[in-house]
Image (cartoon, helix red, strand yellow):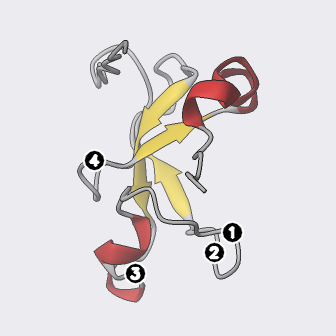
């Protein structure tokens, strides 16, 4: 088994923040590997330092442990990110 670590560099790359943190329960955006597609609503976010580089990975800084990926990273890592279910 391989283990990968994604490190967020907030000094070099953009980070996302929730627009209205009070409307979001942090449980809604915490990564716990449970399916979310059925009841997911996309949160409104903003970029604190928009002049920084836009990376393939981003942190949702209000929610520790949450990973945001762009379309390029999603396609490249789909096999690793996709949840598998044991029968």
Q: Label 2: which residue? A: 40
- Discs 1/3, front: 1
- Could you say where residue 35 lies in the image, as x and y percent from the top left? 57, 66
The local crowd at label 4, few if under 14, some if 14 to 19, many if 20 or more residues have their Cα within 10 Å, is: few
Picture quadrant where residue 23 is located = bottom left
- Discs 3/2, front: 2
Q: Name the foreground residue: 51 vs 72.
A: 72
Q: Name the foreground residue: 3 vs 50.
A: 3
Q: Label 4: which residue? A: 65
- Mark 4, secondary structure of its residue: loop
- Mark 1, secondary structure of its residue: loop
Q: Label 3: which residue? A: 24
Q: Residue furthest left?
A: 64
Q: Label 1: which residue? A: 37
Dot 4 or dot 2: first in sequence order is: 2
* Cα–Cα span, label 1 and label 3: 17 Å
* Cα–Cα span, label 2 and label 1: 5 Å
Q: Name the foreground residue: 72 vs 37.
A: 37
* Cα–Cα span, label 3 and label 2: 12 Å
Question: Left of 82 or right of it: where is 20?
Answer: left
- Discs 4/1, front: 1
Question: Left of 61 or right of it: where is 55?
Answer: right
Q: Which mark is residue 46?
A: none
């Amino acid at each position: 088994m391989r283990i990968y670590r994604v490190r967020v560099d907030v000094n070099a790359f953009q980070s996302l923040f929730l627009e209205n943190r009070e409307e979001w329960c942090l449980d809604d955006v915490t990564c716990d590997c449970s399916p979310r597609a059925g009841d997911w609503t996309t949160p409104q976010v903003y970029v604190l330092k928009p002049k920084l580089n836009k990376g393939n990975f981003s942190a949702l800084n209000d929610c520790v442990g949450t990973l945001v990926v762009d379309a390029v990273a999603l396609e490249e890592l789909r096999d690793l990110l996709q949840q598998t279910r044991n029968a």
